[in-house]
Image: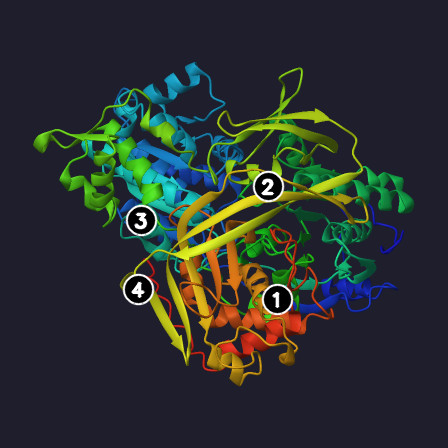
Amino acid sequence: MPGATATTAPGPGAPRREPIADLVARLAAVPGRDGRLTHLDVRPARAAVHDDWPAWADPALVEAQVARGVVRPWSHQVEAADAAWHGRHVVVATATASGKSLAYQLPALSAAAAARGDRGQRGASTLYLAPTKALAHDQLSSLRTLRHATRITTCDGDSSRDERDWARAHAEYVLTNPDMLHRSILPGHERWAAFLSTLRYVVVDECHHYRGVFGAHVAHVLRRLRRVCADLGAHPTFVLASATTAEPAVTASRLTGLDVAAVTRDGSPRGELTVALWEPPLTSHTNEFDAPVRRAATSETADLLADLVSNDVHTLAFVRSRSGVEQVAMAASELLEEVDPALASRVAAYRGGYLPEERRAIEAALRRGDLMGLAATNALELGIDVSGLDAVVVAGFPGTRAALWQQLGRAGRGSQDALGVLVARDDPLDTYLVHHPEVLLGQPVEAQVFDPDNPHVLGPHLCAAAQERPLVEADLPGFGAGARGVVDLLTERGLLRRRGTRGWYWTDRQRAADLVDIRGAGGAAVSLVEAGTGRVVGTVDGGRAHTHAHVGAVYVHMGESWLVTELDLDERVATIERRDLGYTTSAREVTDITVVSDEADQLHRSWGACRLSFGQVEVSSQVVSFLQRRQPSGEVVAEHPLDLPARTLLTAAVWWTVPDAVLAAAGLAGAPGAPGSAETGVDLPGAAHAAEHAAIGLLPLVATCDRWDIGGVSTARHADTGALTVFVHDGQPGGAGFAERGFRAAHRWWRATRDAIASCECEHGCPSCVQSPKCGNQNNPLDKAGAVRLLDALLADADADPAPPAVAAVAG
């Protein structure tokens, strides 16, 4: 088996005696794997800290938990549950598999039992919110095993009318998601009045997933919920659960609009955890710029999955894409077929798109031990109960340290030892992290980044709130300091109407909740419709339609190639035909950026003569052509012009400027006033462009974002600044908080950017440092060496970043 260790697996259920660190060393020593293991970290085991059951806990519930094996709860469970029982809003931010669900189930189910009327009337209800339907259903299954008297049900897009009617009339514990709350429960709050008027608890599970624009939307959905409940006489206590995260109290307070205490002292036990950082090698292949490319992280992950399964190590591999999941599972099975055909059938894939019963069957097989290896998307990251795993392999950094620890925490549940492996992708951030383990493993996890004050997010929710019940002056502070200005603008545009002292009303026939998709990223989706049949094959996000659904674009769906023959932007429809084409397409985009905020409205930091700024910008972009690339070589065979309208985006950006005198002193420019000089040997526009690309790749180091959430523009001389300028901007109207986070952590961000470029082993630039898969200029020009010299000049007089806000006090 190429790249895998072919040892015979012990029988099912046999203990694995080899120390994990020895196993990793043996896997790394396989011929041809020199240098792939870049770092090994062993984290010691931790003993449990128990506490007594609270005196207020429902005896029947305690008895059910004891029968389940929870004789005494862990200290953080009691601490959080007691705070919630006494009416304190609380967030419990502890490690994966630390039993956070007990912290909110204990007070919620106890309250339901204590407040129920003599005839079973509902006296105290709980609304549970999960980011996915799958997690809500998993929670329902877990709650039902308790056999507690509380009336529990899910209510989501899959629920029938009868199920929704029963939930409104009888349920005491309703599990749903923010989308259902936004689109159905709040707009129909009159029908939910009996449930909402008795609402004692609101549980926000896995709240670290609410970031960026999605997080801002959820923040306002929760504010609308609080407002409707208050009108019905209910003031629920909020209990939030999160993976370990920085500033959990600050984040929870921003999400709910309330003062929230944090419980962070983890009393759960933990076995020894061995973390391995693994980098696939450079291959003999090159891309279209003759830059070396690394072996795919998915291929490397498939090898490791097969290795671990063949050594009787129950392993879960996290893969970013659905197609990648299938590839990893298939490749691992093929490798295992060479060792033991019986093992090949014990590896499977798990992803979105499977039927619910298929997912449940896979989860059950993994729990029973029938499956020894599973490749999955992050659907299994979210609290779904999968126990008994020995190892987790993560194919590519998942975007945040919090998400990484959440995924690694799937292994070694309880006190058993575990292995976690991060396999780097061919990406600047991944490459940097596996060579700077202190940044990944020695730093606290990130704080959530989202901006509830974004007027583009706030506006639709103010309209929705006005339809739920008229907005009055007293309501506006709850939606933020900028709410009054947004209301005035909405009134001016005719979306709201003011009726004297009675407040603002929604008067349109359409539902205000339909103004926004809280998970949407780029406008209404464009449907991809098959010519002749009218069948919808897929959709493309509206913000990417110009680059992915233009006439002549090749669209790949489930392994099949389709050609876009027509694009109607007004109707949001692209017509496609099934074609077997020997090429792919990539759009070429021209982008310009203008600073629109006044100097007084900007934030600034001075680094000697260089300057960092944060403010509002207008980004104008236009797709002007597309390239056809022969496969698999990537060779450009043709370029075709396109006539698409320019698009503008008003958003937030961070930018820095390097004046001519600094460039000249650093030997990067000729005479003062000249943007560059042949004598320096530096392509100054290429240096700025390379720095911009690497910075976009490294921003997730300091902000909870993905490189696809942001964009950038660089120029040797910008009209608004009069100097060399590099911009990095949020990809959402009004901003998402990412650029602002970059401004506040600029020194760490740009120092890491410089180090990532300088330490990359390529000669002229590659996907691991300065080449970008989303570049509209086809990665031209780029000057890797010039980027290092430019960033040295920028950082020469850089000051340290200001301290982050203080974390709120721990509850108890």
Q: Nearer the viewer, residue 94 or 31?
A: 31
What residue is shown with label 3? 453
The first of marks 4 and 1 along the sequence is 4
Q: Is residue 349 above or below residue 152?
A: below
Label at residue 599:
4
Q: Earlier in the sequence, mark 2 or mark 1?
A: 2
Identified at 51% across, 38% down, the residue is 645
Q: Which residue is mark 1?
A: 686
Q: Whole-Å distance between the Cαs marked 2 and 1?
A: 23 Å
Q: Amino acid at mark 3?
A: Asp
How packed mark 4 is, by other alpha carbons closer than 10 Å (few <14, some 14-19, many 20 or more), is few
Measure the alpha-carbon separation of dots 3 and 1: 36 Å
Label 3 or label 1, whichever comes before in sequence order: 3
Nearest the eye: 765 or 168? 765
Nearer the observer: mark 3 or 1; the answer is: 1
Residue closest to the far bottom:
665
**Secondary element at image label 2:** helix
Residue 272 seen by the camera: no
Residue type, mark 2 in image: Thr
